[in-house]
Amino acid sequence: MSLKIAIANQKGGVGKTTTALALASSFKRRGYRVLMVDTDPQRNSTSVYGAKVEETPTLYDIIMSSHPAEKCVQHTGYGDIIPGDELLRDADHDVRQDLRQFLHIANAIKEIEDSYDYIIYDTPPHVGVLLRNTMMASDKIIIPCTCDGFGVQGMADFYETVKECQDVRPQL
């Protein structure tokens, strides 16, 4: 079974993608089987991995149509990735509004988690369906932040979101 790690913060520009990429690369260099999941509609991890997003299944297909995760994994020179999709930007409006809306990623990843030692989630800088889905699918959360007043306040605010997910998780 894999260890699933989200690199998350509700603030942008704090190094989430850089941290996710560095962590995935480090684990891969040490011989671990690693899957990157790009949940950010900006798709920076997808771009670094050189993954395709046109005419191929992406995370959007998992969330919107329960597409099997194994059919969304792309094997690239950089490593394995489930690519993000710019269509994810509308997820907050397009995903059915009930508690199950936060389990799309967790349920899909269950199918393939035994194929990997680590699953790293790169997340968007917005508390919404995508970030909550990722937190519900994760075992651990790494919160990069800047060491200034705004960064510390942002982390305190984000802690409340993490706590909400922890409180809901046992109910699902």
Image: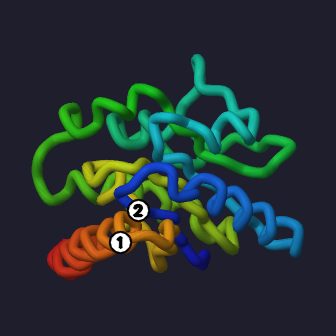
- 35 or 150: which is nearer to us? 150
Is 3 positioned to the left or the right of 151 in the image?
right
Q: Is residue 43 left or right of residue 162?
A: right
Element at badge 2? loop
Q: Which residue position holds label 1? A: 155
Tag 2: amino acid: Asn
Confirm or deny contact between disc 1 and disc 2 (CB under 8 A): yes
36 and 113: which is toward the camera: 36
Q: Dot 1 surroundings within 10 Å: few (below 14), some, or many (20 or more)?
A: some
Q: Is residue 25 above or below residue 94?
A: below
Number of marks in picture? 2
Q: Position of residue 66 (x, y in %)?
A: 37, 42
Q: State the quadrant of the N terminus.
A: bottom right
Q: CA distance from mark 1 to mark 2?
A: 7 Å
Looking at the picture, how far across and down is residue 17, in whole percent? 60, 53
- Residue 71 seen in the current view: no
Going from N to C along the chain, the mark reached first, 1 or 2, is 2
For image coordinates 19% across by 73% down, the residue present is 164
Disc ID at residue 28: none
Q: Which amino acid, mark 1? A: Met
Residue bearing mark 2: 9
Q: Residue at x 40, y 26 (%)?
A: 87
